[in-house]
Amino acid sequence: MNINSQKFGIISIATRNYIEYWKEMVLTFDSHLEIEGKVVFRVFTDQPEKALTTSNCLNHCQVRVHVS
């Protein structure tokens, strides 16, 4: 199995104040990742605008926002 051909998904629930922890986690992960577009974060949140704003700052990861 070639890791460069794989995509990885990470599912998170970030409601209320936990969106701030999620943002920090995603930004940190993105800054350490070297393979562009291979990681997709799926976040379930009650604050989709904050998650989308964070996703615009990412260089290597993708974000899919689900409203909960």
Image: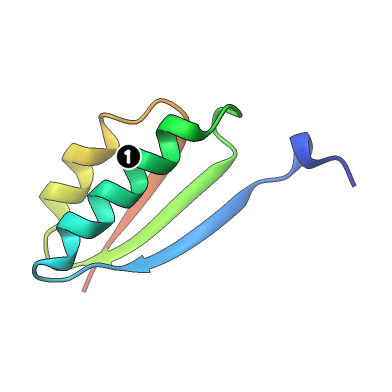
Residue 5 in which image quadrant: top right
Q: In this view, does 55 lie above or below 41?
A: above
Q: Is residue 32 left or right of residue 12?
A: right
Residue 66 in which image quadrant: bottom left
* Tag count: 1
- The residue at which mark 1 appears reads as 27
* Residue 42 horizontal/vertical position (percent): 40, 58
* Residue 41 horizontal/vertical position (percent): 43, 53
* Residue 13 horizontal/vertical position (percent): 30, 71
* Type of amino acid at the residue the image marks with label 1: Leu
Q: Residue at x 49, y 48 (%)?
A: 40
* Residue 59 horizontal/vertical position (percent): 40, 25
In the rendered view, how is the structure colored? rainbow
Q: Is residue 10 above or below residue 38?
A: below
| Viewer-proximal residue among 55 and 67 | 55
Q: Which residue is drawn at 76% across and 34% down?
A: 4
**SS state under label 1:** helix
Q: Residue at x 35, y 46 (%)?
A: 26
Indicate the quadrant containing the C terminus: top left, top right, bottom left or bottom right.
Answer: bottom left
Q: Which residue is drawn at 37% across and 51% down?
A: 64
Q: In this view, does 4 lie to the left or right of 24?
A: right
Mark 1 is surrounded, within 10 Å at the Cα level, by few (under 14), some (14 to 19) or many (20 or more) other residues, namely some
